[in-house]
Amino acid sequence: MGIRVKPIVSMKINFGDVIYSERLIEKVNFENYKINVLDGAGVVISKLISSSNSKRPRDIYDIYLSLTESSTLGKMKHLVSINPTINDHLVTYASLVKENWTKYENSLIDFGIFDPDAKNKLLMGR
């Protein structure tokens, strides 16, 4: 018969240490369960790097939606001020958005976003 093993899937979240230490998590009620999810700033920092990957077109959409939350931009400014690595990744991200805007814009359109100010929102003042 052998031993029955339960498979466990592990995934790495970029800046998990910052997400934990800065409490970038909010509780959401779903079908009578409380689930911890990343807040807007947590989503943004976790997807800064992967958003340039052509196999992950939804990441820029997730960043865009997260930036529509009122507290996200303020939290991002705080995170950049306390973590130079996040700042470095944000600089690289902003350069990629500027250089490849058509690709990002098309991804947003594919997810139903037709915002003429989307580029400025995604650049977060950069």
Image (cartoon, rainbow, N blue to C red):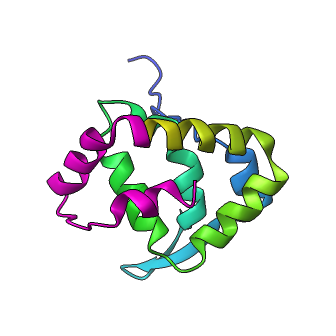
Q: What is the chief secondary structure element of the magenta stretch?
A: helix
Question: Is residue 4 visible in this depiction of the protein?
Answer: yes
Asked whether 64 or 99 is in front, the reply is: 99
Based on the displayed image, in which of its 4 quarters is residue 20 positioned? Answer: bottom right
Q: Residue at x 70, y 44 (%)?
A: 86
For the point 25% across and 54% down, the residue is 108
| In the image, residue 16 above or below residue 26 | above
Give percent across and percent down for residue 16: 67, 46
Q: Give the vertical position of 28 relative to 23 (above or below).
A: below
- Provide residue 72's location: percent of width, then percent of height: 58, 70
Question: In this image, 110 relative to 64: left or right?
Answer: left
Q: In this orientation, does residue 38 appear? A: no
Q: Residue furthest right?
A: 82
Q: Residue at 20% across / 65% down in the picture?
A: 114
Tell me where the magenta segment starts and ends, as one range. Answer: 98-126
Image spot of residue 94 (x, y percent): 52, 44
Give the residue drawn at x 74%, y 38%: 85
Q: In which quadrant will I find the N terminus?
A: top left
Looking at the image, residue 42 sits to the left or right of residue 99; the answer is right
**Residue 41 pos. (x, y %):** 59, 62
**Side of 86 where 58 appears, left or right:** left
**Is 118 within the magenta?**
yes
Report the label total: 0
Depth check: 19 or 125 in front? Answer: 125
Q: Is 108 within the magenta?
A: yes
* Corner quadrant of residue 74: bottom right
